[in-house]
Image (cartoon, rainbow, N blue to C red):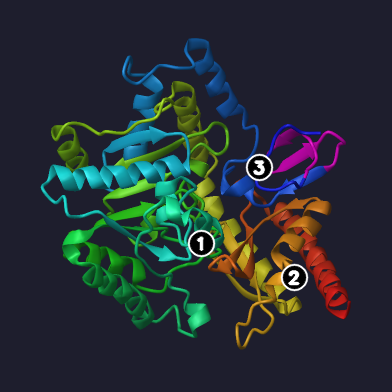
Amino acid sequence: MSHLFYQTSQRRPLLDQARGVYMWDVDGKRYLDGSSGAMVCNIGHSNPNVLDAMRRQMEKSTFGYRLHFETEASEQLAARTAALCPEGMNKVFFVSGGSEAVESALKLARQHALAVGQGKRWKIISRTPSYHGCTLGALAITGYAPLTAPFALMMREMPKIPAPRAYLDGLDPTDPATGAHYAAMLEQEIIAQGPDSVLAFVVEPIGGASTGALVPPLGYMQAVQDICRRYGVLLILDEVMTGAGRTGRFLALEHWNLSPDIVVLSKGFAAGYVPLGAIAARDDLVQAVLDGGGFLHGFTYAGNPLACAAGCAVIDEIARLGLVQNAQGMGRALRARLDALMARHPIIGDVRGQGLLLAFEFMADRDTKAPLPSALNAHQRLVDIAYEMGLIVYSRRTRDGVAGDHIMVCPPLIVTEQHLDEITQTLDAALTRLVDDLALSEMA
């Protein structure tokens, strides 16, 4: 019996230890962490340099409330975070996770509007499908019906535009006209809502779990930035999953040289060693809020010195081990292996992603893009089969959370070719078994 409860009643083995890309349960079975947990453990498990940095900080202090003390660890991490962001984004606010970070970004944006005399701006446009967190504020900008519908009466849902799923719409993602087509939807929505009422546009530069590593079509990100500037709408980039080297840049925004107003970080930012997240914002934006009476928001553990010491050490290890570069090389190698799996398994209808943020989507028919019947629950069945075989992967549904099964394959950035071989060999066997199981289910 367990006194814990989470999303379901499903039980898993008791974890004993984790090292590098591997984890072991108390019975000695080894698992390869092919999803970095929930795309979190970017530098792998139990990195000794991070653990040493945490021990050193613990010997000094484990907590210092932000209203009572400044801490060396939080000041250092703030400075290093700002240095990794686009020029002019020198202000950093720490939290304990991605949902808190998104919530903080929304509140900062609103308080900035009030501070500069634009109090009519309050609407946050986002995309569907999308996922930005589990708090009510973050859910209001999330486009994923199974997660948002139960709470709709408790929150004020915000306007949304379609995510640029060119592969489903039969459009060429390498054609700039495709990027312009989807970006135009943002401008149309701003106009429909009333430009003076729109506060911000929140977007993952490369899609996370809700769209299965969706890379935007050519020109899309630059176009939405230009549209935001044209209408005075703040651009908030949700880099909770894409940040900290995951896509082959420290921040995914670097793929397009973007200059947002606010960047949201978590997950790989502390790589699972401690709960940690952050927002980084333009200097003038923050200063206007501080001059207007202060940021009316905060969390008890904001800027926790132990968490920040771990964050600094994680950034050190990303640089020392060349993990941004490894994400590029190993990402190309893993993508090639997933493409080969698609060639062998007709159930795979699309492979996509950037760096080591990769996914493949199941389809009943590649030509029509028809999804598998939802009742088959294929994505969870594949996860369970792979888990039984000693491989951890992550799954969701691409099409608004109700159809379009996809599997995220996002191992730690320390992976080698040998690890990639193990991942794809296990996936190959798991896919073969899944297809057999689905055939048996259909016959029954």
Mark 2 element type: helix
Q: Nearer the viewer, residue 271 or 288?
A: 288
In the rendered view of the protein, which quadrant contains the C terminus?
bottom right
Question: Could you say which quadrant of the image residue 259 lies in?
Answer: bottom left
Q: Earlier in the sequence, mark 3 or mark 1?
A: 3
Q: Residue at x 34, y 80 (%)?
A: 181
Can residue 87 be seen in the rendering of this structure?
no
Residue type, numbered disc 2: Leu
Residue where numbered disc 1 is placed: 144
Mark 3 vs 2: CB contact within 8 A:
no
Q: Which residues are magenta?
A: 11-29
Q: CA distance from mark 1 to mark 2?
A: 20 Å
The residue carrying mark 2 is 376
In the image, residue 228 sits, relative to residue 33, either above or below, namely below
At a point 65% along the width and 68% down the height, the residue shown is 405
Which disc number belongs to residue 6? 3
Q: Amino acid at mark 1?
A: Tyr
Is label 1 in a helix, a strand or a loop? loop
**Disc 3 from disc 1: Cα separation:** 19 Å
